[in-house]
DNA sequence: ACTAAAGCCTGGCTGC
DNA sequence: TGCAGCCAGGCTTTAG
């Protein structure tokens, strides 16, 4: 159930394990995982493909091969990569398998079937709608004060929902959106366009900082090099949360009780005192 | 053009 | 112990 920091960690781990390797044989077990590929295309397009680069755009994982293809992966809620130890049975909900040139077998599992893969020609990558419409990377200069001001200008959308829109702000999910608003002292229901310049800029900086510090703490936490998913399955993000999941508990700053509300059918957690407006 | 709600799935937890 | 109902960190599609 990864947000950008957890995806970044997965990308770093995959990079270590896949650098210079070939995908000898690949198998799409559950074809709905990659609805725009036939299982045959999927297997033939990856056959003996040598990994060139493992990278990321927003929460999408991109594995580019020297044969001119790129495997686009979105973990959504429960997607996960893991290595299958020799002679062990496949884990439940294994939807794709990749046999590597070092003889190890990489599996993609996904309990809730929300995950997504697509094998595309690398040249066509940026034409994919899912990638083309994404906001600038949060750590890039393009995610600037001016950009953010323009994005919220005139919007009556509650700021929490705007933060979750990957076309406007990239990388936050439901947890880090609540966390960023708490740290910036902004009420999640405030219409985005009503934020002053100063408060908007504070929120933009806070959002970037929340993502950055999550990457740093996650990276330090992942002690097992064989564990590709690292900490996100262990709920590290939640453990470090100041408001997320803390309904009814005292605010760490002012001891008011944290509230839970529903916005866009998702839970939002906030402190009614620290985030008055 | 915006905004809200439903939908995709399985499984864990809570309360009766 | 069994079962119904609720909840879940993402995103797309449909309806209004």
Image (tube, coloured by chain):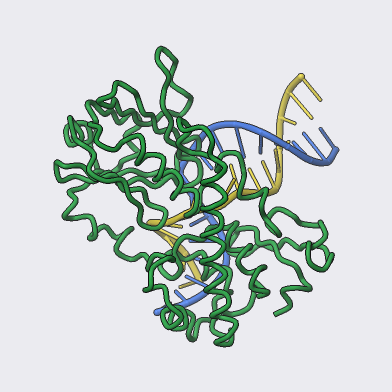
Chain colours: A green, B blue, C yellow
Residue A177 versus residue A196 in the image, above or below? above
Picture coordinates of residue A275, whole percent (x, y): 72, 74
Residue at 40% in and 45% down: A12
Picture coordinates of residue A178, whole percent (x, y): 63, 63
Residue at 30% in and 31% down: A28
Left or right, A100 with respect to A123, comes to right
- Given residues A44 and A234, the one toward you in this image is A234
Which quadrant of the figure contains the C terminus of chain A? bottom right
Picture coordinates of residue A216, whole percent (x, y): 53, 53
Picture coordinates of residue A13, whole percent (x, y): 41, 40
Left or right, A135 with respect to A236, comes to left
As drawn, the residue found furthest toward the left would be A67
Left or right, A182 with respect to A88, comes to right
- Given residues A259 and A231, the one toward you in this image is A231
Residue A174 versus residue A112 in the image, above or below? below
Residue at 51% in and 39% down: A230
């Amino acid at each position: 159930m990864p947000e950008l920091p957890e995806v970044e960690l997965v990308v770093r781990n995959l990079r270590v394990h896949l650098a210079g390797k070939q995908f000898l044989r690949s198998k799409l077990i559950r074809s709905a995982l990659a609805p725009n590929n036939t299982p045959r295309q999927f297997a033939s397009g990856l056959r003996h493909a040598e990994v060139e680069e493992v990278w990321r755009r927003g929460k999408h994982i991109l594995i580019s091969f020297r044969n001119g293809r790129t495997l686009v992966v979105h973990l959504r809620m429960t997607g996960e990569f893991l290595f299958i130890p020799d002679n062990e049975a496949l884990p439940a909900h294994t939807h794709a398998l990749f046999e590597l040139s070092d003889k190890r077998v990489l599996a993609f599992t996904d309990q809730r079937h929300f995950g997504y893969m697509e094998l595309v020609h690398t040249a066509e990558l940026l034409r994919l709608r899912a990638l083309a419409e994404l906001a600038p990377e949060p750590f890039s200069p393009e995610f600037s004060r001016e950009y953010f001001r323009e994005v919220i200008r005139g919007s009556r959308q509650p700021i929490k929902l705007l933060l979750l829109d990957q076309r406007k702000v990239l990388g936050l999910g439901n947890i880090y959106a609540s966390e960023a608003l708490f740290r910036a002292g902004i009420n999640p229901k405030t219409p985005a366009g009503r934020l002053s310049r100063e408060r908007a800029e504070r929120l933009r900086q806070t959002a970037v900082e929340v993502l950055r510090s999550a990457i740093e703490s996650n990276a330090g936490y992942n002690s097992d090099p064989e564990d590709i998913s690292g900490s996100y399955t262990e709920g590290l993000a939640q453990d470090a949360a100041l408001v997320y999941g803390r309904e009814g508990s005292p605010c760490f700053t002012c001891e008011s009780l944290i509230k839970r509300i529903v916005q866009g059918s998702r839970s939002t957690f906030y402190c009614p005192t620290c985030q008055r407006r």
